[in-house]
Every structure is written in structure tokens, then in C-alpha cells.
Image (cartoon, rainbow, N blue to C red):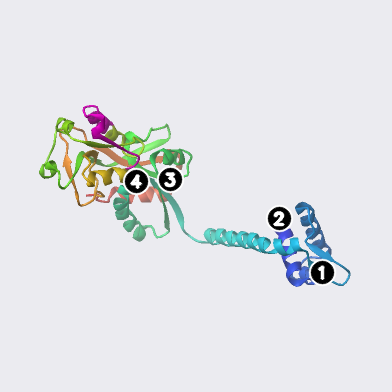
Amino acid sequence: MNTDQLKSFIQVAENLNFARAAEILNITQSAVSRQIHSLEEELGTRLLHRTTRTVTLTPAGISFLEDAKNVVGRLDAASRKIQRHQSSSIQILTIGCTDEAILNLLCKVLKSCRAQIPELYPFLKVIPHRSILGLFYQGEIDLLFGFQDDIPLKNDIIYQELFRIPLCCIVPDTHPYAGRTELATEELYLENIVVCNSYAIPFKAAEMQNRIAQHIPPESTYICDNLQALLTLVRAGYGCSILPQMNFISSDIRIIPITGNEPLSYGIFYRKNAVSPLLKKFISIMATTSFQ
């Protein structure tokens, strides 16, 4: 089945006249007949009743007409979209990140890019860690934001650090530790803790959560599937948790630095063999952006 067959059928069905359909399509009447005949053979049913004087639709033809119009309409729309894209000056840059925490920071970069790279068309993908890695390695993402320890570096992958983020303890604002300016890891051994699957949060944060959980009874450990669930339980007072110090955490949660831990490196990943002029411009603008 092809569009020529569908277009021939639509014109004959709407005009009930092979000669008129051929005129509209700018082909011969015999060509229209061949298209209709081959379409009917593929579908295994008659779409039209034809005599020397009249053309009428069969019940199958009446049913198929709307579907044929929808298919041709979608194909025409897709064709116009591609033509517009080819004739425009926009350049698509696919940017990936694993959570919404980076979006506030990314917004600063994109504001500068709008003025300096007007042809940039940013396409943002916020996808869980496990899924986004495959897309990045397959070349479907041009630039990936993430923690250095979370992305296995392959031969053609380049990592560029943007800043370092300390690991912190997060507690509800009603917690006895809420007024503290720093905490030692050992002080959390007597607290309830909320932990998260390692694929949903940075590896180093999950590692510390699990290390603390080893000193806590199982009934005092709450396990979550994702970051949003973790934050909800902390806000509700079920326990404390460990996360990088990011500015997306709710106002009713207190963030307390943990002593004796190296800050985590956060930056961008991109493929060495896929560095386009557009990506170079984007990285250059990002390098001059303050993320404080």
C-alpha cells in the first residue's frame, strides 16, 4: 500500500468519477484504475462498484475512506514539517539529565544561549539514570549532565567538570538537628534514615545512605524507589537522608553539611567524535556561566 494508491482512491471516492479523479491527480485514467485495482487486491476486498455509467462505494470503501484520509493527511503533515525544518536555520541540541535538580542551573545557560545562539533549538530529556545512559551511548543525546562517578567513561566520552557539590544530611525543619551547621556521619547512626535505590540518586549519596543504614535497625530504615518519594518521607518526619546539596529541596527541609567527605564532581559528558560547532558554542557559554 502506498500514498499514490490512497490518493487515487480518495479522489475517486469523493468525486465518484474516474475521469475527474485523473484530472485532479494529473495522471491518466488508466493509471487511476491500476492504483485502485492494486489497492483492492492488497486489502482483499472491493472498495468500489463500477459500471459503465456509475461509480459507488461499497460498505468496505465507505469504512476505509476516513482511514485513507487520515493516513494521507498525516504523511502530508510530516512532509511539510520536514520541509520547514530543512528550510529553517534552527539547530537542534539534545540535552539530557537524570533529575529536575539541574533544570534551574540549565535555565541560566539557556537564557544566555537565546541571545548568543538564536538558531539553537534545545530539546531537553529528563530521564532516569538507567534509561538515559543507553540513549547517550547510542548518540541520541548530544550533551549529558551528571555526576562524574555516575557515568562510566568509554574511550570516546569526554567529561568536563562544572562545579563540586558536598554531600549533606537533609532533615525536616522540626528535627533536633535542624539548627546544626554541620554533622558527623556517626551522629546519624541513632536516627531513622530514608534511603533510595542507587539508580535514582547519585552513586556516592546512595553509598553513604547504605553505609549509615548498616548501623541502623531494619525497622528504622525506609526504602524509596525515587527521589520524590524520599523527599516526601523526610518532609513528613520519617527520618533523615543523604543527598548532594542542591537548590531544589523544599523550604521545610533543612540541609546540613556532613564533615569529612569529598565534594562530588558535577559536570557535562559528550562524545569526542560528535563535537559540532553548535555544541562547542554551548559549552563555551556554559563555561562562563556562574552556577552559584
Q: Earlier in the sequence, mark 2 or mark 4?
A: 2
Q: Which residue is mark 4?
A: 99
Q: Earlier in the sequence, mark 1 or mark 2?
A: 2
Q: Earlier in the sequence, mark 2 or mark 3?
A: 2
Q: CA distance from mark 2 to mark 3?
A: 35 Å
Between disc 4 and disc 3, the foreground one is: 4
Whether 15 is drawn above or below 239: the answer is below
Query: What span is colored magenta in the figure?
Result: 207-226
Instruction: Depth check: give the residue in front, 285 or 262.
Output: 262
Q: Which residue is mark 3?
A: 142
Q: Earlier in the sequence, mark 1 or mark 4?
A: 1
Q: Which residue is mark 2?
A: 2
Q: Amino acid at mark 3?
A: Asp
Q: Which residue is mark 1?
A: 55
Q: Amino acid at mark 2?
A: Asn
Instruction: Determine contact: label 3, label 1, CB under 8 Å.
Output: no
| SS at mark 4 in the image | loop
